[in-house]
Image: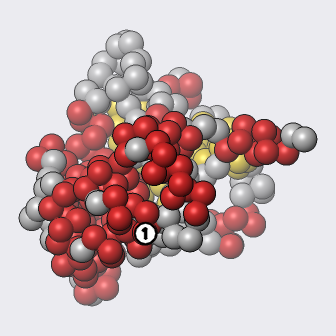
Amino acid sequence: MPRKRAKRNEYEARLIQLLKRRFEQARLKVQDHLKVGKLPLEIDMLVRFGGERSRLNTARLPKLFRYFRQHNVLEIKTEQTPLRVSDLLKLQAYTWLYMEQRQVHEVEQVTATVIAHHLPATVRVALPALKYRRVHKGVYKSRSAFDSYLLDLSELPEALTPEELQIFTNRARREKVFLLRMDDPKKQALVDAMNDLYQSEVKKLMVYLDAKQKKVKRYVDIIGRKRVAAALPKEEHLAALSKKDLLSALSKKDIVAAMGDDETLRLVYTKMGRERFLKKVEEISRRPIRKQQTQAARP
């Protein structure tokens, strides 16, 4: 097998492995690379609920996959294997072959899904002809005999994207997952996948964060108080850490420095004190953006 093809398959294999683990934790039965014909025709993943007459319970699944039915056929496309129009047609054919092979006659029990890193322009243009319509940001659905879904990882909101998929989307999301899970033994498979597939990114993070240290206070000491204070408003990966803990780990002088030239904030902080100020910051950060804009617009 050529080296480039082997590398592409490595990304797909790792994503299948992570999803398989997640689905099995939700007590579903999973088969990967299931053959559905004499030629090298195989389904990337098949996810099934227990027996044919068992009650469907999707509550254990990530929110993104709660549309699952009894039989669910999945096709995986990573950044190394861009989606083609033919892949959408192939998914339909493979699903029919599976239904014939397993004698599944009720189409309401079946779903077919393509998980794609992004949608190339050629695919996006063809979606209307294939009767796919956008039902949610990053989620497209086509209804023929059975429900077919197309999940565009580049568009999916972070809140809807399971961590297993987030690490295959972009660097910013990978960094956040790594920061949150690097010391979590239950998430070791995620960390191992990032270490194996994105070695250069992980090495840079390890050097920058000195991941051996677990305490935020120690993190501040390692990086330097001035650098952390300057980074608070602009570094994306710091969002994965607790801003409240970071501010608590900094001195009063450093917090004021992080406020920049905003004299009003300096005066408020001095008057309110650390605890009341942090509590107020946390309270304001939870307010809906629209509500704040509406209030600001009133005379």
Q: Residue at x 48, y 46 (%)?
A: 271
Query: In the image, is residue 84 above or below residue 141?
Result: below
Based on the displayed image, in which of its 4 quarters is residue 261 positioned?
bottom right
Local secondary structure at mark 1 = helix
Q: Position of residue 123 (x, y in %)?
A: 66, 67
Q: Residues within 10 Å of mark 1 (few under 14, many from 20)?
A: some
Query: In the image, is residue 264 above or below residue 118?
Result: above
Task: Pick whichever, 83 or 195, lies toward us.
Answer: 195
Q: Position of residue 251 (x, y in %)?
A: 29, 60
Q: Residue at x 18, y 78 (%)?
A: 207
Q: Is residue 247 left or right of residue 288?
A: left
Q: Residue at x 9, y 64 (%)?
A: 212
Q: Position of residue 174 (x, y in %)?
A: 35, 64
Q: Residue at x 40, y 23 (%)?
A: 59
Instruction: Give the labeled residue for mark 1.
Output: 257
Q: Is residue 159 left or right of residue 16?
A: right
Task: Pick whichever, 191 or 7, lies toward us.
Answer: 191
Task: Pick whichever, 225 or 105, lies toward us.
Answer: 225
Q: Position of residue 138 (x, y in %)?
A: 60, 52
Q: Quick one: quadrant of the C terminus?
A: top right
Based on the displayed image, in which of its 4 quarters is residue 168 positioned?
bottom left
Q: Is residue 12 left or right of residue 286?
A: left
Q: Examine the rendering and report whether any part of residue 72 can be seen.
A: no
Q: Quick one: quadrant of the N terminus?
A: bottom left
Of all residues shown, which one is farthest toward the right? 299
Query: Which amino acid type corresponds to the residue marked 1 in the rendered image?
Result: Ala
Q: Examine the rendering and report whether any part of residue 216 can be seen.
A: yes
Task: Pick whichever, 16 or 5, lies toward us.
Answer: 16
